[in-house]
Amino acid sequence: MSNRPLIAREEQVVEDEVQNQLKRVYTPGTPITEPALFAGRHQLLETVRSTRSVGMNYVIQGPAGLGKTSFARQLFSGTRAFWHTASEDTDFVSIFLAMLLSIDGAVTEAETTKLKKAGVSVGSDAVGTKAEFGTELNVKHVQVAAQKLDLNFVLERVVRHEQKIGSIVIDEFQRIKDSKIHTQVVEVIKGLADRGSNVTVALVGITAQGEELVKDPEYPTYLGRHVTAIRLRPMTESEAIEIFQRRETFFNVAFPPELQQKISWMSCGYPYIVHKIALQSCMAWLVRSTAQIIGDLVVPWIRKYILRQKEIQTPDLKTLSVSIDRDDVISAVQMFVIEYEGNHPLAAESLQRLGQTEREQLLSGSVDGIKADDQYFPCYGRAKEYLKSSAVPT
């Protein structure tokens, strides 16, 4: 009797497991939480940490794909941080009610019952929220929860229990479109600062170049006094290359130095693009290496299975010694170009229209002067150039 169906099933198990492990090495779009895998930004991180002071809060902003959430995760790691990932439905209540309910003792049992009962909706009544701010802040009337989860209530409970929550981080803040909620959050920042609280509020979100994340008219007056704005810039080449170096050490997934430099160059300093091309390169490696992996792992197991000796061993990347070559990267860049052109149908035409000066800027690294509707357009242009220089039809 043939064992082919058995072999095919186990081959797929092994391939799926290796693929899942590779997806934990390079993670485009997923924040880095493990300090050992955090690459680049170390000097900025140390500077912010060393200059943090009571009453200072942070707005971490910049284009998508620069690693803002990863930076915030490192900055506030170990600080008893409460994290809220915003959505279009996020309001004052959904942020701060969940936080208060997570702090043991912050809300009594009776208050908890009342808040939970009414906390899912936002009331339409205007409620004053001045809260002893002194003379420099005008009384504002903002919509808050029907159960009167107002500013005073939040501030009083946070300050009283600040030893249990060191920071409040609101990620994806750009998803909150209602400017009234921006105003409420700014009032919380100002209120905590006025009370000398040690609790830090941090807002993290996507902004275009020159834009501000927080849409509140009084926010600019707090910059430098109660709020430090951190606008992340693209990584340097050495910072981007560190992404590869840390993963080679941690996972034994190796890219030759010249390929690290090429991917770093194509990424234009966006760690998201580094991870995206690197992960697809790993997947290309898996395609060409599957036969060898199967021969090393599955066939011996089949022999033992027939003799009823042992179960198959789960493969580990460190034992497989993943070694990426030029063809793997070319395959990955081809997929990146195809995907980009599918999402941006006029990309190829726009690239062809670039003048000589813009093309030189694109290839030299001075991409700021290139006008494009999409921030990754320079990455696409460099990817096309890489394929051209590698004599690959595009």
Image (tube, rainbow, N blue to C red):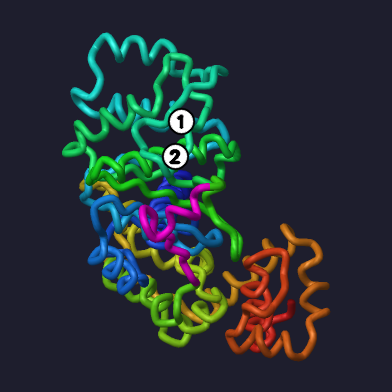
Q: Are marks 2 and 1 in contact (CB under 8 Å)?
A: yes
- Comparing 35 with 118, the one in front is 118
Element under label 1? helix
- Comparing 163 with 56, the one in front is 56
- For label 2, the residue is 185
How many C-alpha atoms fall within 10 Å of the one at disc 1: few (<14), some, or many (≥20)?
A: many
- For label 1, the residue is 92
Residue 236 inside the magenta-drawn segment: no
What residue is rendered at 29% in x and 70% in y?
Answer: 47
What residue is rendered at 27% in x and 67% in y?
Answer: 250
Looking at the rendering, the stretch of residues picked out in magenta corresponds to 218-233
In this rendering, the answer to whether 40 lies above or below 342 is: below
What residue is rendered at 39% in x and 55% in y?
Answer: 227
Residue 230 inside the magenta-drawn segment: yes
Q: Earlier in the sequence, mark 2 or mark 1?
A: 1
Total marks in image:
2
The answer to whether residue 286 of the structure is visible from this angle is: no
Query: Looking at the picture, which amino acid does disc 1 mark?
Result: Phe
What residue is rendered at 37% in x and 45% in y?
Answer: 169
Query: Looking at the picture, which amino acid does disc 2 mark?
Result: Val
